[in-house]
Structures are given as structure tokens and as C-alpha cells.
Amino acid sequence: MTQTPEKLWEAQSRRKTPHLAAPGEESDGPLLDPDVMKQVTAVTQRQVENCVTRSFRRWVGRTPLEAVANRDGRELVEALLLGWERANEGMPAGPGTLRPDLNAVRTLLNLPSSVD
């Protein structure tokens, strides 16, 4: 049976193991429950991938998918992704760390994969 992330969060909160803090709550450690982490990661990845079809004011109402159709838009999207990748590099690795797969976004936008 698949549970919603909210239900898994509630179940994790009732346990005595460390968990990720809810907004306004003090954290007592990283998110350690693999089921919760798996669902949170999946939801985060879907949200990141859905960004390719959302319009942004900076691009005069164009989506990233539309923006990559011309050279200037493609450079803007590339710069955005590079900045995001650099920000991810500065994050500590380990349990409870969310790092979306930005190469999946690059694939959706028909951009070359970044070099790891």
C-alpha cells in the first residue's frame, strides 16, 4: 500500500528516530526513514522536471522548453541549470540530502548532459 508523503511524515514524526524538521520545528537529525526519503525525492524530482513547462516572467512568459528554441533562450536556460548544479555541489552529501537529477531536466530540454 502506497502512502502519501504527509502520512509517511506523520508516521516518522511519531517514531523516536531522528527526522527532518517540519517548518517551524527544530531538527534533531537527518531524514533517515528510507520510505519517506524515497517519496520526498520522487516528489521533488517531479516538481523539478515540471519546471520545463512552466512560464517564467524573466523569459517574457516563455517556458524553458520554449526558451531553448533559440540561441539566447538556450544560453539563459543553460546558465540557470549551471547555477543550480553549482549550488547542489555546495550542499553536503549524505542521508536526508535532496539533489534533483538535473541531467533529467537537460534531457527533457534536449540539452547536453553536464559533466560530473
Image (cartoon, rainbow, N blue to C red):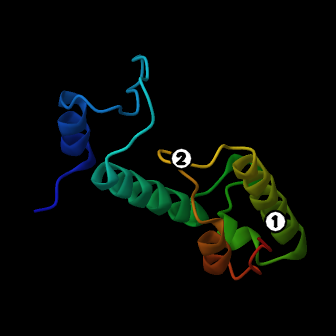
Q: Label 2's element?
A: loop
Seen at 77% across and 81% down, the residue is: 112
The residue identified by callout 1 is: 78
Seen at 57% across and 59% down, the residue is: 100
Q: Which mark is residue 97?
A: 2
Residue 47 location (% of width, % of height): 48, 56
Q: Nearer the viewer, residue 73 or 6?
A: 6
Quarter of the rendering occupied by the N terminus: bottom left
Would residue 116 be found to the left or right of residue 5 on screen? right
Image height of 56 relative to 28, above or below: below
Would residue 29 be found to the left or right of residue 9 on screen? right
Marks 1, 2: nearer the viewer: 2
Amino acid at circle 1: Glu
Would residue 114 be found to the left or right of residue 61 on screen? right
Residue 91 location (% of width, % of height): 68, 44
Q: Label 1's element?
A: helix
Answer few, some or many: residues within 10 Å of disc 2's Cα (few below 14, many 20 plus, some between 14 and 19). some
Instruction: Give the CA separation, mark 1 to mark 2.
Output: 24 Å
Seen at 55% across and 48% down, the residue is: 94
Seen at 62% across and 49% down, the residue is: 93
Residue 87 location (% of width, % of height): 75, 47
Image height of 10 relative to 74, above or below: above
